[in-house]
Image (cartoon, grey):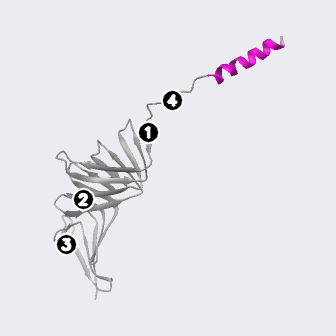
Amino acid sequence: MSNIYRLIIFLPLFILGCAPNEINENKVIQKIESLDMTIFSNSGDKIYSITSPNSSYNNIDLEFNLKNPIINILNGKETKYIISSEESTLSDNNKLLKMKGFIWNIENTNYLLEGNIRFENQNIILNSGKAILGSDNIIEFFNPVKYIIKDENNENKYEINSENAFYNLNTESVSFEAKDKRVKSIIYF
């Protein structure tokens, strides 16, 4: 009798132990240790390139999840902009790039920035909650906009608050627009 009990106890363990290992060939998420990708237009021109040390690709959502990516937005063979972030996603057949506070619809060639936007060069500082860079090289900053002109000591010299501001990257000029409120200026002496 004891042999029958042993057989009853060990038979299920033996059967479970001999179950074949299943290999899932249809993985939903594929890990990519080092991603270096260049996207071309229909005419064969390079649009942008992405490098990421750690990324993954979701087969169901058809979306890349990129960690610490560096994106080079190209204009011909020259790099027009370099953007980096902690995380980003690339979806819609490589046509929609989203970063924290940055969305680029590649077909429309518009760049949308949201959050605490700060544009600074050697002469000015522009702060806004939202900005769009169009294909015409004009950045539109949305309400509220704070514009500061710096002096040679890098201190605030002139300050403007406005609903909207337009910064032309080609001419490095700024224009202001207000629909509901007046443009308010402060001069420091």
Q: CA distance from mark 2 to mark 4?
A: 47 Å
Q: Residues within 10 Å of mark 4 (few under 14, many from 20)?
A: few
Q: CA distance from mark 1 to mark 3?
A: 45 Å
Along the polypeptide, which appears first: circle 2 or circle 4? Answer: 4
Q: CA distance from mark 2 to mark 1?
A: 32 Å
Q: 179 left or right of 65?
A: left
In the image, 152 versus 16, the foreground residue is 16
Task: Report the span colored magenta.
Answer: 2-18
Mark 4 or mark 1, whichever is nearer to me: 4
Q: Residues within 10 Å of mark 3 (few under 14, many from 20)?
A: few
Question: What secondary structure do most residues of the magenta stretch adopt?
Answer: helix
Q: Is residue 111 above or below residue 152?
A: above
Instruction: Find disc 4 in the rendering and name its residue.
Output: 23
Q: Confirm whether the magenta stretch covers residue 135.
A: no
Q: The disc labelled 4 sits on which kind of residue?
A: Ile
Instruction: Find disc 1 in the rendering and name its residue.
Output: 29
Disc ID at residue 132 = 2
